[in-house]
Structures are given as structure tokens and as C-alpha cells.
Amino acid sequence: MIEASGIPTVIVNLMPAYQVSVGAPRVAAVAHPFGRPFGDVGDVATQLAVLRGALRVLETASAPGEVVHLPFQWPQDPKDTKWGPDQPSPIVAMMLKK
């Protein structure tokens, strides 16, 4: 409804393939843990950088469903990062079944 009204949108997302499958118009993909798409608590610099990156996607995306992977890395080594909850969310559980 928002897009149909002429207001462009962008989604900051940790699971870009899922967002594209449900018809998201623009996706700013970021490799951060669940619940922290904009960065860690109190990390204002990263939060602003992710926000600015998403706004650039909004400006530059040329086609519906376009996914742009933002160049941000979580500060911990991936093996030391808790990427999601102990129990998967219903969406993740559904995706794991496929």
C-alpha cells in the first residue's frame, strides 16, 4: 500500500532471500545477528552507517526486488557470535524445512 501510494521503501534485513520471496521492493542486506540489524546496543556510529547505507539503497535501487549487500561486518569472529535465538523463530524453522 505504501509503495502503491508512491512512497518508496527499503527493508534492512538479515535474511534477504526471504524478503525477496515475499515481494520486498528493495532490500539492504546486512550480515548482523538477529535482533541487531543496525548494530550493537550503543554503537551509534554503526547504527548511523547502516541507516545511511539503507537510504543509499533507496536512492540507487533500479528494479523491484533489488538486494544490495551492505559492507558491514559484525565485530566478533563469526564462530564467537550468537547469530540467533536458541530456538528458531517460526519463519526460520519453516525455511529450514525446505
Image (spheres, helix red, strand yellow):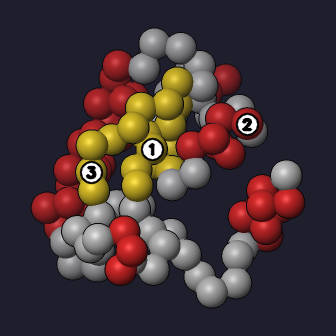
Task: Classify mark 1: helix, strand or loop.
Answer: strand
Q: Which residue is mark 1?
A: 29
Question: Residue 36: horizontal and vertical position, in percent?
Answer: 41, 69
Q: Residues within 10 Å of mark 1 (few under 14, many from 20)?
A: many
Q: Is residue 53 left or right of residue 34?
A: left
Looking at the image, which residue sits at the far top? 62
Q: Is residue 42 left or right of residue 62?
A: left
Q: Which residue is mark 2?
A: 21
Give the amino acid type for the residue marked by disc 1 in the picture.
Answer: Ala
Q: Which residue is mark 3?
A: 72
- Which of disc 1 and disc 3 is earlier in sequence? 1
Q: Residues within 10 Å of mark 2 (few under 14, many from 20)?
A: few
Give the amino acid type for the residue marked by disc 2 in the picture.
Answer: Ser
Location of the N terminus by quadrant is top right
Q: Is residue 53 left or right of residue 10?
A: left
Looking at the image, which residue sits at the far front? 79
Question: Residue 28: horizontal and vertical position, in percent?
Answer: 43, 40
